[in-house]
Image (cartoon, rainbow, N blue to C red):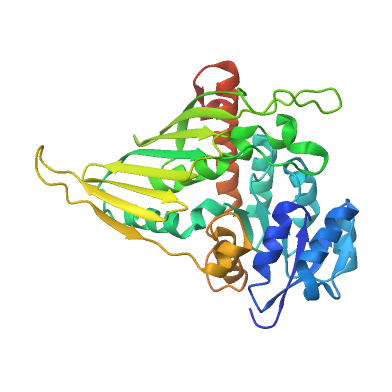
């Protein structure tokens, strides 16, 4: 875009501040407004802006922001359960919108947003950072180029730390997050759709809350969020994918790992190492011609966030789409489909049965 892009950040918490740090890396972009009902969160975000905080307007809600300032784009980083209410007035404007995952906490709300977004001319982008981690992006590119042949199996593993503490402890309850399989795992279900190029037809998830938050009580209520799971997703043209999640493995060196196996080879990548390993099929007993590729990440992008530089790269792609220089890479429909797979997994884990997507969509 010509001139400065004026951005409003809706949600001034931890992830909002990560977006702010990354927006500061784009000289032609200026944070013009912050929205949050919690004064301490606004103060922390203004502090994050530093000298760029001069002239930034703050508002308690979206409608006040829309009435009180002129913007080009907004980034929605408010708690999951607020997304539909936040998006309703925004979808009536011509502002470009980047909405953090999950798009909404329920399938019905996500589908409503996707339908409304499809009627707009303005950009709508669902934030799916994992697509934009440079090693993962290169992994996806190589699969698309046919390096492994016809993809049959995809496996994703995340061994990480527990959910962080959020304002009001909202992320301790599935009614606020959509459940772990929506809140955390929609990223991975989005990757499955992108990598396979297929749509999910059925989901089986075995998961539980076994370690984290067992002794926590909030206003007398115990948290109910899954902290570990295995999820198998079957797709409409025969591909299968599996997700292994553990949220009490903070000692793991490589937080994420992805494997894709086709009829010609296997490809894998690990994060944060950023190494891609290519293993072609060989006759039994023959030498194994394994090759390795390291994918670098911009140092400033790494320093600005906790998602292996992906927030920076995604914001760059969003701003290009906003300027009409590039297409939207992650639509509201993509966001809604990822929510649907997550909701199916959540239901499967709780009812201990296979769930077909056609049963909930």
The one nearer the camera, 153 or 221, is: 221
Count of numbered tags: 0
The quadrant holding residue 2 is bottom right
Foreground pick, 273 / 76: 273
Residue depicted at x 60% and y 30%? 227
Residue 304 visible in the picture: yes
**Compared with residue 263, is residue 128 higher up or lower down, i.e. above or below?**
below
Q: What is the x, y in percent for residue 352?
A: 54, 16
- Left or right of residue 204, residue 238 in this image: left
Q: Nearer the viewer, residue 304 or 342?
A: 304
The quarter holding residue 11 reads bottom right
Quadrant assignment, res 23: bottom right
Q: Position of residue 27 (x, y in %)?
A: 66, 79
Position in image of residue 265 (x %, y %): 23, 46
Residue 78 location, x and y as percent?
76, 49
Mark yes or no: residue 92 visible. no
Question: Residue at image x 65%, y 32%?
Answer: 179
Q: Quadrant of the C terminus?
A: top right
Kindly identify the residue that appears in the image at 77 percent across and 69 percent down: 49
Name above or below for residue 44 compared with residue 104.
Answer: below
């Amino acid at each position: 875009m010509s001139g400065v892009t004026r951005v409003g950040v809706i949600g001034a918490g931890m992830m909002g501040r990560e977006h702010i740090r990354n927006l500061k890396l784009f000289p032609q972009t200026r944070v013009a407004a912050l929205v949050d009902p919690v004064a301490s969160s606004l103060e922390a975000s203004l502090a994050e802006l530093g000298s760029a905080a001069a002239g930034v307007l703050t508002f308690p809600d979206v409608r006040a922001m829309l009435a009180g300032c002129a913007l080009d784009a907004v980034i929605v980083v408010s708690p999951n359960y607020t997304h539909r209410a936040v998006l309703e007035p925004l979808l009536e404007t011509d502002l470009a919108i980047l909405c953090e995952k999950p798009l909404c906490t329920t399938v019905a709300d996500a589908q409503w947003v996707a339908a409304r977004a499809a009627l707009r001319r303005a950009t709508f982008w669902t934030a799916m950072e994992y697509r934009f981690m440079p090693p993962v992006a290169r992994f996806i590119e190589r699969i698309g180029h046919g390096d492994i042949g016809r993809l049959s199996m995809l496996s994703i593993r995340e061994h990480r730390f527990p959910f962080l503490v959020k304002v009001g402890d909202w992320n301790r309850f599935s009614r606020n997050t959509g459940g772990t399989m929506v809140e955390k795992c929609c990223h991975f279900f989005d990757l499955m759709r992108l990598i396979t190029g297929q749509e999910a037809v059925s989901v089986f998830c075995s998961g539980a809350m076994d370690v984290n938050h067992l002794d926590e009580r909030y206003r007398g209520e115990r948290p109910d969020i899954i902290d570990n799971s295995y999820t198998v997703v079957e797709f409409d043209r025969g591909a299968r994918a599996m997700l292994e999640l553990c949220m009490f493995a903070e000692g793991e060196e490589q937080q994420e790992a992805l494997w894709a196996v086709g009829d010609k080879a296997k490809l894998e990548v690990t994060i944060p190492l950023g190494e891609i390993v290519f293993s072609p099929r060989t006759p039994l007993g023959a030498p194994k011609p394994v090759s390795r590729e390291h994918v670098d990440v911009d140092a400033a992008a790494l320093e600005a966030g906790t998602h292996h530089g992906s927030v920076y790269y995604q914001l760059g792609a969003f701003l290009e789409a906003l300027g009409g220089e590039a297409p939207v890479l992650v639509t509201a429909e993509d966001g809604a489909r990822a929510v649907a797979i997550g909701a199916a997994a959540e239901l499967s884990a709780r009812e201990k049965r296979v769930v077909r997507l056609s049963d909930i969509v």
